Amino acid sequence: MNLRDLFSKKAFFNLIHPVENNDKNAIIAEIAQSASSGFDFFLLVVLSCSIATLGLITDSPAVIIGAMLVAPLMSPILGIGLASITGDGQLTRNSATALLAGGVMAVVLSSLMTLVNARLPFVVLQELPGEVLARTHPTPIDLVVAMAGGLAAAYALTKPNISAALPGVAIATALMPPLCTVGIGITLLRWDVAGGALLLFVTNAITIAFAAAMVFFLRGFAPETHIINHHLPRTLVISAILILILLVPLSYYSVSFFQQANENRRINEIVVEQVHFLNADLIDLVTRYNGSGLDMVLTVQTIAPLSYEQVVELQKGIVDGLNKPVSLKVNQIFAKQLDPLVPPTPTPTLTPTATFTLGPSPTVTATPTRLTNTPTPTLTPTHTVTMTPTATSTATSTPTHTPTPSIAQVYLNALPRLLIYQSPGGPVIGQIYQWQTVTVLYGRREANGLIWVEILDAEGRIGWVPEIFLRPITSTPIP
């Protein structure tokens, strides 16, 4: 076979071996059964939607992957692709009904779960998690991923010996998480989030259906007339046109996303440069656009408190670098620098103590004389003063009682985690979870109606937490 024959239409179709009729009927029956809407289908939709919504809210990729493996939405999409080739109207209706009903159920259920979380905040959504935002800006890359996933899924169904690849395809194509993101965006009234996630789901569904239809056509599932004449079915052409139409909004999202990414990179570089001038380290940067300007919240780590004048100079430097108005707030985290080559020098505390010493007292001595007419010299009592030492202040080292750190266990009842603050009510420096043990240090304050204690956690962070969430651990002597 020469190069011209290799690229000819007939030779190309001969490279793809058609499926035998018996195997073909078995594959059609299997897809028709899995693509129908029944109790098993809706049960898996509810379970996978619950897992995906919780994974999105808690920003956990592992939980989201588990939801992708359980989600049954791939089967109706493959059923639509197969029906577009075979011309089976019943399979088309069943697959479209299952896909539409499953999608609506997933959106409604995720909206309700997000609403319940907002009323009883198991997880406080101060800002959207990264896993949610990652599904709001579809790009042509997502279309290519869906195309490859659809080809792999359809080909694996026609080759039973490689059907183990289907779980990986389900993870790559990600059908359930975008639907749950739509529900989260609707509940939070973030229509940009809901619209972007819906576009991602539509892109994945249409592209997978087109890729599956193309594989089924090449594997010989089309009617005999199309196979003999090597004509593409009209449904396959319509799917290709829809994919080309989808490229328009996807390209727009891609350009907007890349522009925003470049702007964020420029902002980060300028902020890091200006913070470096203050001998501080940038820990976190939160930026929000407010029309023509920016609302910026910085968290920096310093070894000395920043003054008001330094923060003003920092804001001025950022404004000059970005050439736009910036509203700035700075959170400080104080850190003490330790050099392993210079050990700390202990400084003893001297307590002055006054010591009084008693000396001899002055004495008076009188000698009696006998009365005579002749004057006789007598001894006159003499008052003798003895020098007495005065009270002196002698510096002596007096031991001072120091409280001993104790061990306590975190008890949160219904809270998901306990935040560690740099000072009572100050910036957050970390978090600890239920039943973890911490060391309660010496600090103890009252603020905001709570008693705060200073702790040291297992990661070496020193901060403050409310005392009501700690249970002391005491050792019980064994007789």
Image (cartoon, rainbow, N blue to C red):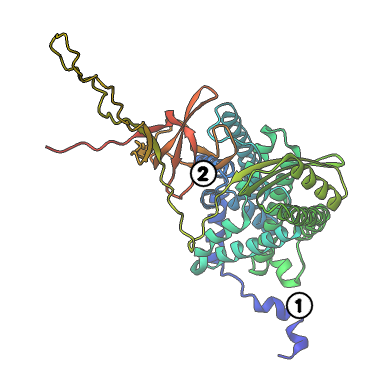
- Residue 155: image quadrant is bottom right
Q: Earlier in the sequence, mark 1 or mark 2?
A: 1
* SS class, disc 2: helix
The label nearer to you, 1 versus 2, is: 2
The kind of residue on which mark 2 rests is Leu
Foreground: 182 or 41?
182
Rendered position, 86 above or below 191: below
* SS class, disc 1: helix
The percent position of residue 400, horizontal first and vertical second, equals: 35, 37
Relative placement, left or right, of 200 versus 399 is right
Q: Residue at x 71, y 90 (%)?
A: 1
The percent position of residue 5, horizontal first and vertical second, equals: 75, 86
Q: How many numbered discs? A: 2
Graded by Cα atoms within 10 Å as few (under 14), some (14 to 19) or many (20 or more), the crowding at tag 2 reads some
Relative placement, left or right, of 12 versus 373 is right
State how far apart marks 1 and 2 are (Cα): 42 Å
The percent position of residue 174, horizontal first and vertical second, equals: 61, 53
Name the residue carrying label 1: 9
Name the residue carrying label 2: 44
The percent position of residue 476, horizontal first and vertical second, equals: 21, 36
- Residue 195: image quadrant is top right
Q: Residue at x 53, y 33 (%)?
A: 122
